[in-house]
Image (cartoon, rainbow, N blue to C red):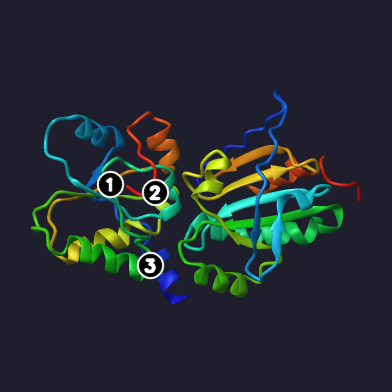
Amino acid sequence: MYTILLALLLATPPPDLPLIQPADLAAVLKSEGPRPLIIQVGFHVLYTQAHIPGSEYIGPGSRPDGIQQLHQRVDPLPRTREIVLYCGCCPWERCPNMHPAFQELQSMGFTNVKLLYIANNFGKDWVDKGYPVATGER
Amino acid sequence: MTSAIVLGILLAATPPAQAPSFALTDLHGQKIELTAYRGHVVLLDFWATWCAPCRSEIPRLIDLQTKYRARGLRVIGISLDDDPAAVRAFDQEFKMNYPVVIGDAALAARYGRILGLPVMFVIDQDGRIRARYDGETDMRAIERAIAPLLKAK
């Protein structure tokens, strides 16, 4: 219970976060340039229905096991690796997953992390906008 | 709350679609089959334990279930949590007075995809979808939607 309450308290990110807008990430995906590592830190059913092509499902950032899996996934990477986190489970200011995941990457020393700003939810702010979508487990 | 999405899509202009059927076992081992709810008005709530807007809505849904049970309202929760144990703990903590089943991507897809939480459906006595609400919803809007469908007092 305390874990959930803590996650909810941490759910509101401060205003100085390194955000990336959906249109800007979609442009990156369309370009020939290097791609960031894109990680979904939301819930699995959402990922399976629709996710950003090439993104990896890692588990909810609000849960200790999600943070542990995130840690294990990125630990071997150079701390300058560009990483984009996204969720889209809920309106931005009420998402319990993004901020704990961001905090974990910060504490690990990653210096090039961006947070995909999804104002409402992944359906409305990514899928309905016509940005690229994949389904299934990968 | 200011940015809460409240999209009540009333389907009055076209014939309401039939709600996709399902048969799932709830947290207490009871089989929940949507077709068995014909004759009742069903509020079908897709939610998750860690979803803040969902958590805000659950006590209001509990109240709605109490208030309108005699008039034929039945609330069914479909959790999209990855961890069923968290759902069981939540169910006990909040003393939920309606059944909760664990959903999956296939069921979500049949309901038009659930790409954000919560999502609620109003289903009439004939099993037709009368409304869909995306995001935290003012329960007064829900009451206005179900009132004409429920039995008279």
Q: Earlier in the sequence, mark 3 or mark 2?
A: 2
At horizontal 41% and vertical 48% (from top left) the residue drawn is A48
- State the image coordinates of residue A123 (x, y, percent, origin top left): 44, 39
Q: At numbered mark 1, what does the secondary structure look like: helix, strand or loop?
A: loop
* Image position of B17 with respect to B107: above or below: above
User: Label 1: which residue?
Assistant: A55
Marked residue chain, label 1? A
Left or right, A22 with reference to B114: left
Mark 3 or mark 2: which is in front?
2
Kind of residue indicated by mark 1: Ser
C-alpha separation, residue under disc 3 versus residue under disc 2? 16 Å
The answer to whether the residues at label 2 and label 1 have Cβ atoms under 8 Å apart is yes
Mark 3 or mark 1: which is in front?
1
Left or right, A133 with reference to B92: left
At horizontal 88% and vertical 47% (from top left) the residue drawn is B151
C-alpha separation, residue under disc 2 versus residue under disc 1? 9 Å
Q: How dense is the environment of label 3, judged by Cα within 10 Å: few (below 14), some, or many (20 and up)?
A: some
C-alpha separation, residue under disc 3 versus residue under disc 1? 19 Å
Marked residue chain, label 3? A
Q: Quadrant of residue B129?
A: top right
Q: Are marks 2 and 1 on the same chain?
A: yes
User: Label 2: which residue?
Assistant: A47
Q: At numbered mark 2, what does the secondary structure look like: helix, strand or loop?
A: helix
* Image position of B59 with respect to A116: above or below: below
Closer-to-camera residue (B127/B5): B127
User: Label 3: which residue?
Assistant: A63
Kind of residue indicated by mark 3: Arg
